[in-house]
Amino acid sequence: MPRPKKPASPFRYFNSSPEIIRLVVMMYVRFPLSLRNVEDLLAERGIDICHETVRLWWNRFGPLFAADVQRQRANRMRGFRQWKWHLDEVYVKINGELHYLWRAVDQEGEILESYVTKTRDKKAALRFMRKALKRHGSPEEITTDGLTSYKAAMRELGNRDKQVVRRWANNKVENSHLPFRRRERAMLRFRQMKSLQKFASVHANVHNHFNAQRHLVDRQTYKTSRSAALAEWQNLMA
């Protein structure tokens, strides 16, 4: 039998090493840095690249790394029992026009889905929820705010009995917007809906990967988790 062909390396056309590419993408997506901030920080470490190279690399490799991270976590998350979701939407301006970033977060603070729409009516809520349910399965409970679009969408999906609306119950998903807001300010906002959707999805997966919940664990446990996350990141797309 012929041997199965080994998948071609995504780094094969680049002169820089995969380690440097992974470092650049992690710095730009994970931290609230501009393209030129990343260029200057790397220059201090003797790595000479242009800020446009940073842009090229995160556009090319960011979605690949994010998909690899999600594949590794998806199977483990599907096996959860008593899974609880929190849904919320936040407005984002693109060229002065309001758009809405919908987000689903589980009880552990893991960002499950990010989806961008121009409206926040029943049709938009339905598209978002169908996408999340198809990818992650059905939870036991779904916490939302008082937006009527959620109620109408969940009634159509047959999940109305799972909806929970309580004061302050949705703080977990509200807090999940904060890292994205910091990145948005560093990037001086977005100019296209497509680029917002792409970056929001990549940022969510990278944030999940390095989110060690440091306020809930002791220092030694946090350092161990951080080292494990960095080691896994270095092996992405290897």
Image (spheres, rainbow, N blue to C red):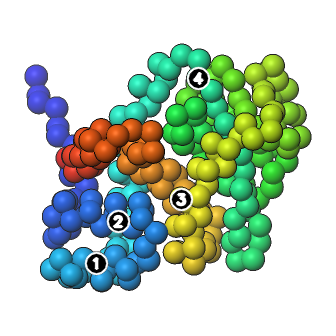
The Cα atoms of the two marked residues, 1 and 4, are separated by 41 Å
The quadrant of the rendering that contains the N terminus is top left
Q: Residue at x 51, y 39 (%)?
A: 110
The three-letter code of the residue at mark 4 reads Trp
Q: Within 10 Å of the Cα at label 4, are there few (<14), some (14-19), or many (20+) other Cα atoms?
A: some
Who comes first in sequence, dot 4 or dot 3?
A: 4
Q: Position of residue 109 (x, y in %)?
A: 54, 39
- Which residue lies under the disc numbered 1? 41
The Cα atoms of the two marked residues, 4 and 3, are separated by 24 Å
Q: Within 10 Å of the Cα at label 2, are there few (<14), some (14-19), or many (20+) other Cα atoms?
A: some
Query: Relative to 78, is 103 above or below?
Result: below
Q: Position of residue 128 (x, y in %)?
A: 69, 41
Tell me the element at label 3.
helix
Q: Position of residue 134 (x, y in %)?
A: 60, 29
Query: Relative to 225, is 38 above or below?
Result: below
The Cα atoms of the two marked residues, 4 and 2, are separated by 32 Å
- Which residue lies under the disc numbered 3? 179
Tell me the element at label 1.
helix
The three-letter code of the residue at mark 2 reads Met
Q: Residue at x 34, y 65 (%)?
A: 27
The Cα atoms of the two marked residues, 2 and 1, are separated by 10 Å
Q: 211 or 223: which is nearer to us?
A: 223
Q: Within 10 Å of the Cα at label 3, are there few (<14), some (14-19), or many (20+) other Cα atoms?
A: some
Q: Which mark is residue 205?
A: none
Mark 2 and mark 1 in contact? Answer it, CB < 8 Å: yes
Q: 98 or 230: which is nearer to us?
A: 230
The three-letter code of the residue at mark 1 reads Leu
